[in-house]
Amino acid sequence: MVMSTSDLVIDVQGITKRFGGRTVVNNIPMQVRRGEIYGFLGPNGSGKTTFLRMLCGLLTPDAGSGRCLGYDIRRESGEIKKNVGYMTQRFSFYEDLTIEENLDFVAQIYGVPQRKTAVDKSLERLGLTARRRQLAGTLSGGWKQRLALAACLIHEPRLLLLDEPTAGVDPKARRDFWEEIHQLAAAGLTVLITTHYMDEAERCHRLAYIAYGNLLARGSVEEVVQAAGLTTWEVTGPDLPALAEKIRGQPGVEQVVAFGMTLHISGRDAGKLRESLNPWMTDAYQWQPIESGLEHVFISLMETARDNFS
């Protein structure tokens, strides 16, 4: 589907960055609509953080062009910074200041008018009011995450860039965080989020997957899974670890992964995969074809990607 330029918060093409002769982001395009939650996935070192930093003006691309929030990413990075909330991978606030003091400091940096009102609103929105005088250094991972998100939102940005924001927090904190993100998107805020969690990727409206700086897939979850062309079989039965060892390395078999009391066997050549599995399709095991999931797809993409570390 062709998107109207007026609907695009991010519209960039050919974004490239090199460090010391190594290309860490290679000719990446991206289009993100207003109010969309866009997932940006890839293994560690794939170039996701570098790409985010180029979008918000912290790094200058070596090649490529485009606009973020209507501003040219090369010539108007200062305007972009004013309108973006950027949540880094690491907690980057003052641990010897209270939650309230940290938010007030961030509000001062952005020149937020009526600062006290803005801080109070931010505390209330993220459920931090009762803890406003707690030192940031004493917070658990989930509460630090809330403080970081509150700080990102205090200047009312139009775009959130979230770099692995849920790493190291418990499942409930992750779920609460995503509920908040969906409410913000419903109100018109655009979110670009990096994550390693497949359940989080499935919560995104659309996503892109990069490895070693190269774009390998993009689209909705359904589009990405369909484009991968993987066939997956699920098997149950006795001594599955032994069966897995026998199947690995057979023609057409790309993945053999334990899922609880089952094995999932995947490959892109359905005919060759079935032929290799036939010898074990006996009464001793129960086999059934299942839909491939994002995890199957991304492992397959990773195994076909070429390392750019050279």
Image (cartoon, grey):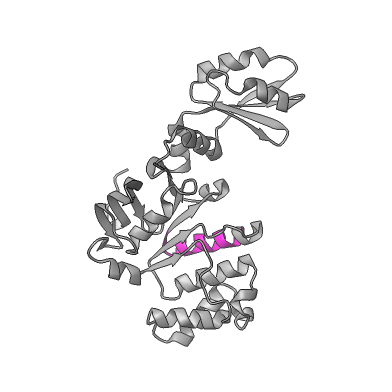
Q: Which residues are magenta?
A: 175-191
Across and down, in percent, residue 270 comes to: 51, 20
Is residue 217 positioned above or below 232 on the image?
Answer: below
Q: Residue at coordinates 44% horizontally, 80% vertically from top-left?
A: 107
Residue 37 appears in the picture as rendered:
no
Residue 290 vs residue 139, the one in the foreground: 139
Q: Answer with the quarter of the image where residue 219 lies.
A: top left
* Drawn side of residue 237 relative to residue 86, left or right: right
The total number of labels drawn is 0
Main SS, magenta region, reads helix
Across and down, in percent, residue 106 comes to: 45, 78
* Drawn side of residue 274 relative to residue 118, left or right: right
* Drawn side of residue 158 relative to residue 132, left or right: left
* Drawn side of residue 31 relative to residue 262, left or right: left
Across and down, in percent, residue 179 comes to: 56, 60
Residue 272 vs residue 31, the one in the foreground: 272
Across and down, in percent, residue 184 comes to: 47, 64
Q: Is residue 10 magenta?
A: no
Quadrant showing the N terminus: top left
In the image, farthest residue toward the left:
75
Is residue 86 positioned above or below 133 on the image?
Answer: above
Q: Residue at coordinates 39% horizontally, 70% vertically from top-left?
A: 157
Residue 202 appears in the picture as rendered:
yes
Q: Answer with the quarter of the image where residue 142 lies.
A: bottom right
Q: Residue at coordinates 42% horizontally, 68% vertically from top-left?
A: 85
Q: Residue at coordinates 54% horizontally, 18% vertically from top-left?
A: 251
Q: Is residue 178 magenta?
A: yes
